[in-house]
Structures are given as structure tokens and as C-alpha cells.
Image (cartoon, rainbow, N blue to C red):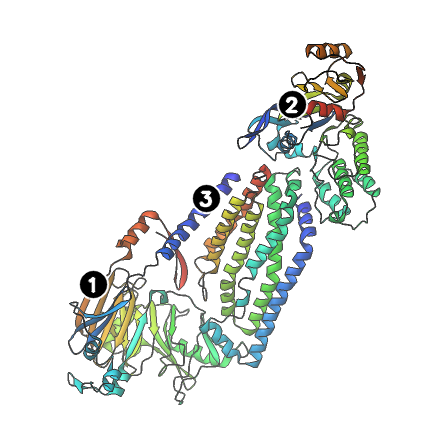
Amino acid sequence: MPPVIECRNLTHYFGSKPALRDVSWQVLPGRICGLLGRNGAGKTTTINILNSFIEPTAGRCLLFGEDAHRLSPSVKARIGYLIEGHVQYGFFNVRQIEKFYAPFYPKWNPDIYYHLISKLDIAEKQRVSTMSCGQRSQVALGLILAQNPDLIIFDDYSMGLDPGYRRLFVEVIRDYAADRKRSILLTSHIIQDLEGLIDDVIIYQRGRVLIDMELKDLLGNFRKFVFETAGDFKDFYDEPNHLRLERGEKTSTLYGFLDQTAASVSLNQLGIACGRGFREEKIPLEDIFIALTGKY
Amino acid sequence: MKTIARIILLALGVLLLSHYLPEGYRLLIAKRYPRPPIAFYSCVQKNFLFYRYNNDTLTMVDERGTNYERSDFEQLLPLDNYLQLLRDDNLPKAIDGVALVPEKIKRERISLRIRPDMIDSPGVPLYPLLEAESGRVRLEMPDDFMRINSRVEFVIAASNALDAAKSEKFIRAFQTAGFAFPPRLIAGNATTLKPYDEGYFLVDHAGAAFQLRMVHGEPDLKKISEVAPPATKAQWETLNPRFIHVQEVETHEIRCFLISGDNRPWLVVGKDYRLVPLPLDDYEPSRDSLVIRGDLLNRLITAANEDTFQAVALDRDYQVVRRYHESLPNLRNTAVGKVRAILFPFTLDFEDDGCWEFFMR
Amino acid sequence: MFKSLAYKEWIKLRIYWGLIFLAHLAFCLFLCLQLRRICKVNAALSVWDNWLFKDFLFFRPCQFGPLLMGIVFAALQFFPEILAKRLRLVLHLPLSEERAVGAHLGVGLGLLTLAFLPGVALLAFCASIWFPHEFLLNLAYIYAPWLLGGYAAYLFSAFTLLEPTWRYRVFNFLLGASFVRLCYFPTTYDGYLRLLAWLGLATAAAVVLPLLSANRFGKGYGS
């Protein structure tokens, strides 16, 4: 099946500073894909290119087979887009905003919008500008879902939301995508929310793709091993092999796509004694992310 | 669409720059246009004298460039400076056999100025027709305004309504006189600050000239070619005036200035509507500024434009007595002008000659 | 689709438009009442005289009204769009960028016209009571360049506001100011007779300029 989103050798420079270097990845139909990366890794640049807000210096970005900055109106109608910060027109109230967007989309379904709105504690005539961040996020989300898009791009859906609204968001997205007929691309800094949500994960590091795999593969194969620190050695990071060693005062940790045996072998190769208490520990997605991308 | 927008942006930008950059340059340079001289005719020396301005310093010279002191200069122009000479007890008793009586000198002074922007300049076509013989010392503005298009109408200001009776009266007069509506030209001097009222000079649709006055409330309309003596009748019939300037003078001598259909300047003089051609070389109404001055003994006509200045002195019979001609230093030929021509190969100038127009140069 | 965009602009602007409309109408009414008082108390004749010969126009205070309204309208319409880059919401709608921005301009120009016209009509009506039709024609010729100035001010303000980079904003502003000045040459009677058609053409052509800025905005220049 042709990919819904396809980035081919995307490269972008801001002046002489590279933001993206030869980035290529895909989102397949019916999948939820998380685009992760630290601040300045290139996520926002990629999203801006996807939304035809920037023209890449080199490379192509295709949505439903069309160039992102030359989308035809019919393809635009199939894509829903959440702007960072849940930006919407503040002068509308909830009824007016629905009335505004509806005529543009042939598949518009107002029920889903009003269903979400009904759960919020807002007056009918209340303007969007007077709502809280969380309430506004629900309005924005409702409008996108009512559009019935085949692809949704969430640019940092979690920004400014409290845990309750964040959880609500995740649940709604999960329900919505359950029929496997929609594709979703999202970015977020709250990694722990994504564990139960996304199917595929792409991790950026300094403008390049570091990881591009299914989430279950990442969670299943990336492991953490701890052991008592013995001897003097430095922290070690091997980016191509995604291997990281951190020395602590009492315990040290080894991260990588390794099983227990391979882990011991690696330590030996590094000349480090496999000290006492060498064992595997469970590692949540957030820790995997930090291990792969580092703390600095 | 983007290309069209870019082209429009470029076009607008270029047009506006071609106007504002030269303007800015002019502002920066702040050099005064070399002013044309002011001419006088000395009835004493029988030659021309001038005020010349050289960067704001005034010199008083004659045709050969001889400088004069102020008192000498004034002595040579007794009819222009009679008050000063009277005070200094220097006024001659007579010149060329004509006695110099101060009241007479004052009365005979005439000055008309015809600027290019007065020609073809639009205005609101409503004309106050004054009562020419009210019996009062001063003229008074009427309560109504006249309009002439396919008929003659008088609109009363206070009520904004037509004065039907008066309008009818005038229409009959126009019909009797054989006036062809609508008129091509209506010219008058719509002020009460004048010695008497000549009324309006009209040119009808066929090109014939008429004069309209209101006397004791009744219309006094004359077709000039019919009341003029045989000598000038033929002239009036073919004149076809395209511009008329009315300015009443104390002596009633000059009725109006007009430019005929072939662009020649004339003065209409005296009771018989005598046509006096102004003997100027190459007068172009849209380019040249004309000044007509008169005194007890002479008439002086000067015409100036950017490049040339000419003066003609006439006697009281309008015979040429002396001529003068000079080329003016054009700003374009100065260093400043040359630099300007190099910097700005084309300029967009907006000029107000009655109507705002633009020229690409 | 145009209906929806018009609806959005109306919701955004309706209160402001109402205020501007009323303010303009009230101002014109004030001028008319002032004229009426002068005509009744003094001789109407002197008013005619002053208009014809001394260039004293009873509606001259309106001279910069359209200009001001054009700028304010453009600001009210486009500031909310450029803050937090909300215009992106419209640019993502399933229609071409030109149509989307063009619809905004169309609504803006339409609302501006609806705000001007009743006041001008009132002035014309009042003038027709006190003056003959020649004066009305004169009023039209004198007012027309001011109206053009108002439309031009609106279009160039939109052109300036939508431009994302400061450098070009300054340039756009200067371009707009220098164009608008052409509508305000000192003039009496129908001094603009020959210039009006050209100015009108140039103002109409300027409609496409905000599309350029919006295109640059959409491309993310300066972000």
C-alpha cells in the first residue's frame, strides 16, 4: 500500500546551519506514528515542511503522493492538522466555529464534535479566547475529528495540557484510530503517554533519523542492564550501534539492543568487569528515549 | 497569479520611484530655478530696464547690462515710481508732451497676468451675473447663479430653486440673439472688487462670440460680430476663441484678453471691440506665462517660459515701439541638471496646471 | 466556501465595523447639520460663494476619514490573523491560497465600502438639498480620490501586515505611503479629472499585492 506520508532525503538548512540532513521515513496507512526527538532535533522543521510552511532545501515530502507544498484542495480536505498550542480563532464560540469549518469538508460529521464539547464545562456562547488551554484543546480536537480526515498531524498535542486533558486526548485518539482506517502522525515531549498509543516510532537526533521501527520491536529489543560499579571507567556511547554505558558511584548501567549474553560480551570488550548484581531491568519508553538521545 | 502580482509590484515600485527619487533629489539640492527677469519699459530712455535676480541678489540693469542705483533706476521709470518721486519732489511735469498728473497715472495703471494653468482649468459651471448698472457706487453680488447648458437658468442660492421667470426672460434673449446652445466657453470676472462689470463673454456652440450683461434686471446680450464695426466684423467671425480672461480696468479700455482658435493672443479693446493682436514670437499658451502691463504712455507685454524671455513695448495705439528677447539658462543645462538627467533617465512628474496631470519624461 | 469565509470575517469584525460605521455616519451627520445651520442662519449665498471662490468645502473635514478607516480596518482584520500565525488555519483549508486570501480581501473591501457609503450618501443628499447639481458633481470629483486613498490604504496595510519579514514590511509600508500620497494632492474643483482613472486602475491592480505577502507568510519566511 502506498505510504500516506513519505519523506525522501529531506534536507534543510537555516542559513548555513543544518536542521535536517538526508531524512527519509514513511507513515503507512492505518498506523499511528510518533515522531520524537529532543529540542532542536528537527521535529518542528519536519512538521513545518509537512504542512507546506517551509520549502525544504533538498529532498521531497509527499502526502498521499502529492508534494507537501503543492497539495490540491481535495487532498487538503483529507488531512487534519493540529497547530502547536491548539491555536484557533478566538473570536468564535463553539457553535460558530463548527458552522465555519463544516462547509469546507464533504465528510463533516458534527456529532463527534458536539459529543466532545458536551463533556466540557463551557457555555454555548462562550468564546474560544476565554477558554482554558485544556478546553481549547478539546475544541481543536473535536473540529479535526469532525472533519473525518484520513490523516491527522498533531504538532505537540500535549503542550500546555494538564494530565487529565492529556489522558483524554490520548484516549480519544486511540478510539478514533481503532478502526485502522486513519493514519496519525504526532509529536510530543510527554513520552510516557505514547507507550500505549503509537504503533511506530521515529526518533530524531541532530537532524538525522536515529531510530525508525515499530514500537513493539523497540520495547521488546532495547534493554537495560545494571551492575555494581567496580573499577574506574568512563561513560561510553556508540551511536551507530545504539550502545550506551553510564557509570554511577554505586551502580552502572548498560543500554542497547542486546540480550544478557551479548551484554556481558560487550562489557568484556570494553574491558569492564561484569561486576556483582548484573541483571536486566525493565525500561519504559521514556528511559529508552533518554538512553538513545542522551541527557545533554 | 504570483507572477502577475510580482509584475504589478515591480511596475508600481518603478513608477513611484521615478516620481519620488527625483523629488527627493530636488529637495536635497534645493537650488532655486534661475528666475526670469522682470522687465520695465523706460519712457524716459526709451529702452528696457530689468530687475535681475542672481541667487537672491537683486540687480537693476538695462539691456546692455549697465547697473543702476536704485534712485537712478526709479527716475527712469517715473510712471511706476511716481509716488516715491512725488515725495522726493522729482516727478517730471510731462513726458513726450503728456502731463504727468498723479491721479491720471494711477488711473491708467493696468496689470493682467495669464498663466498656463488658467487655460483649460475646470471649475464649477455656475456664474454670478452682476447687475451692471445698479446706480450704486459698489457692485453687489447677486442672490442667484447662472448656468448655461442647453438653456439658461438662474438658481437662487437661498432656496436652491430655479427663478423661472428670470430664466425665461434670458432664454428669450438668447434665442433672439441666435445663440447656439450649449456654449463652448463662459468667461467673466466673478468678483465685486472691480471698477465696473463687463459681464460674461460667451462662445456659443458654433464658435461665435457674445457678450452678456444684466442691465436693470434685463438681459443685454450682443453677438459681437454683429455689433462690431465692419473693420473688425470679419475678424470676429473667424476668431473662434478658445480662452477668454476678463479683468475690468478703471479706464474701460481693455475689455478682455483672448486666445483665438489658432492659438494667437489678442486684446479686445474699447467700445468697438477692436481686436489688437499681441505681437509675440512663438507664444504657446500652455507653456508661456504672459504679463500685460500698461500705464499712461505705453503698454508692456512679457512672455516667459523655461527657456526664453521676451518683452514687447507698445505705444497707446498698440504699435510696437521696442522688442527684447533672451534665452534663459535652463536648469537642465546646469551641473545640477545634468547630474539629474544621468541619475534619473525617466521621471514621472505630477503637475498642477489647473488639473493634475502626470508626465513621463 | 466564500460564504464561510465571509461569515468568519463578519463574526470577527462585526462589532468594530458597527462602531466605525456609526462613527462615520455620525460625523457626516454632524457636518450636514452644521451646513444646515449655516445656510439657515447666514445667507446660503455666502456658502455658495465660499465653496465656489474660496475653496471652502463643508465636507473637507472628511478628507482623511477614508484613509484612516482603510488602515484601521486592515489592522482589525489582519492582526488577529498574524498573531500566533492564525492565518495558517485558513491556508490549510481545502481551497487554493489565492481564493482564501482573496475572499478575505473581498470581504474587507466590501465592509469598508458599506462603512463609507452611507456617510457619503448622506453628505450628497444634504448637498443636493442646499446646492444645485453642479456642486454635487464637484463633491464627487473631490471625494473620489479620498475614497481611492482609503481603498489603497486598506490594500497596502494588508500587504504590509501579512508580510512576515520586517525588512519587507518597511518597504511595503513606504510603497503604500508613497502611493496613497498621490491621492491627496491639494486640489480644488475637479483637479483630479484626468488622474482619477489612472489612480483607480492602479488601486485595483494593488488588490493582488496582499496575495504576495500571504504567499510568503504561508511559505514561512522569517519564521
Tell me how far mark 1 sits from mark 2, CA to CA.
Answer: 85 Å
Residue type at mark 1? Glu
Most distant residue in the bottom direction: B135
Question: Is disc 3 surrounded by few (<14), some (14 to 19) or many (20+) residues within 10 Å?
Answer: few
Q: Which chain is mark 3 on?
A: B
- Asked if residue B339 lies left or right of residue B186, the reply is left
Residue type at mark 2? Val
Q: Which residue is mark 1?
A: B326
Question: Is disc 2 surrounded by few (<14), some (14 to 19) or many (20+) residues within 10 Å?
Answer: many
Q: For residue B29, which numbered disc appears in the image?
A: none
* Residue A228 on image: x %, y %: 78, 17
Please name whichever residue, B199 or A176, is drawn nearer the observer in this view of the structure: A176
Q: Which residue is mark 2?
A: A209
Identify whether A35 is placed above or below B323: above
Question: Is disc 1 surrounded by few (<14), some (14 to 19) or many (20+) residues within 10 Å?
Answer: few
Residue type at mark 3? Leu
Q: Which chain is mark 1 on?
A: B
Residue A171 picture quarter: top right
Identify whether B245 is placed above or below C93: below
Is label 2 or label 3 in front? 2
Residue A141 picture quarter: top right
* Residue A212 on image: x %, y %: 69, 21
Q: Which chain is mark 2 on?
A: A
Query: Is residue B156 in view?
Result: no
Please name whichever residue, A258 or B76, is drawn nearer the observer in this view of the structure: A258
Name which of mark 1 and mark 3 comes first in the sequence.
Answer: 3
Which residue is depicted at the point 58% across and 45% down? Answer: C162
Is label 1 or label 2 in front? 2
Which residue is depicted at the point 48% across and 75% down? Answer: C50
Pointer 1 and pointer 3: residues touching (CB < 8 Å)? no
Give SS at disc 3. Answer: helix
